[in-house]
Image: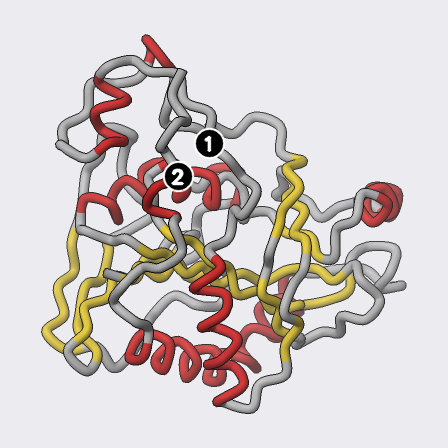
Amino acid sequence: MLGIIGGSGLYKLEGLEEVRVLQIDTPFGKPSGPIVVGKLEGKEVCFLPRHGPDHNIPPHLVPYKANLWALRELGVKRVLSVCAVGGINRNFRPGDVILINDFIDLTKGRESTYYNGVYSPKVEGEDLPAKLMREGKVVHVDMSQAYCPQMREFLAEVLKKHGVPFHPSGVYACTEGPRFETPAEIKMIESLGADVVGMTGYPEVVLARELTMCYASLCVVANPAAGIAGYRLTSKEVLQMMAQREAQIKSVLRTFIMLLPEERSCGCQNILEGAEV
């Protein structure tokens, strides 16, 4: 099953049939909000707004571990994230779509792993992640391909099908938030090789990978980053840009859901092999 996590400006996914709205508790607390489960052309999908249905959860307080665990409990094997980002790469313009292929973590205090060794909770479940946690294992997960190559390749095909121009790769730098970055910080982040900056991409991608989920991120440049923009940044312009792209993004998501192959051929499901100490 596919799970979609909506970012700023994407709080609903219309057109689903046989809809169920589920309140789920996890060993890591409650997720950002109710998870909507429904079918599109016979294919089941879960939708969760990252910041809550009313956008009342700031990026540094999003319950990332609860979100991914709740999706896991519902049987989600693939996660597609939609994010608004600031553009750092001078070739990226507001409204551009990017398929992220790597990340840089610049956050400060977020819980970023399920595997805390002897301090891991004794969770239920018979899959490998649950067993490793119950056994108190230390796990080091490879991040050479943090974003699922199969999902990225298929997303590119869907974007082409819809005639949506996009950048096939980009490095995402994740900052703590909720404030925007300073021009000096953006200059530093640019020197590290990042193309875009956001506040929610990490640890979401890592947690999904730890649960052997495929993960891909479709990002929309909402504005140029601080110092590049040349003007004061506001949340209003982020939401305005996402509103302009909302219909297009939802159309892409619908096609992606309907045509995504059931079989996973990427190897993400095997990422825990050899990862435990």
Q: Nearer the viewer, residue 266 or 61?
A: 266
Crowdedness near tag 2: few (<14), some (14–19) or many (≥20) residues, C-alpha within 10 Å: some
Name the image quarter holding the C terminus: top left
x and y percentages locating residue 229 in the rendered image: 84, 64
The secondary structure type at the circle numbered 2 is loop
Q: Does any portion of residue 235 appear in the rendered image?
A: yes
Residue at (14% x, 32% y) in the render:
125
**Is 206 situated left or right of 183 in this image?**
left
Q: How far apart are marks 2 and 1 (CA)?
A: 7 Å
- Work out whether 66 lies above or below 71: above
Q: Position of residue 155 (x, y in %)?
A: 47, 72
The location of residue 219, given as percent across then percent down, is 57, 64
Question: Circles 2 and 1: CB distance less than 8 Å?
Answer: yes
Disc number placed over residue 141 in the picture, else none: 1
Going by the numbered disc 1, the residue's amino acid type is Val
* SS for dot 1: loop
Q: Write down the residue under mark 2.
A: 271
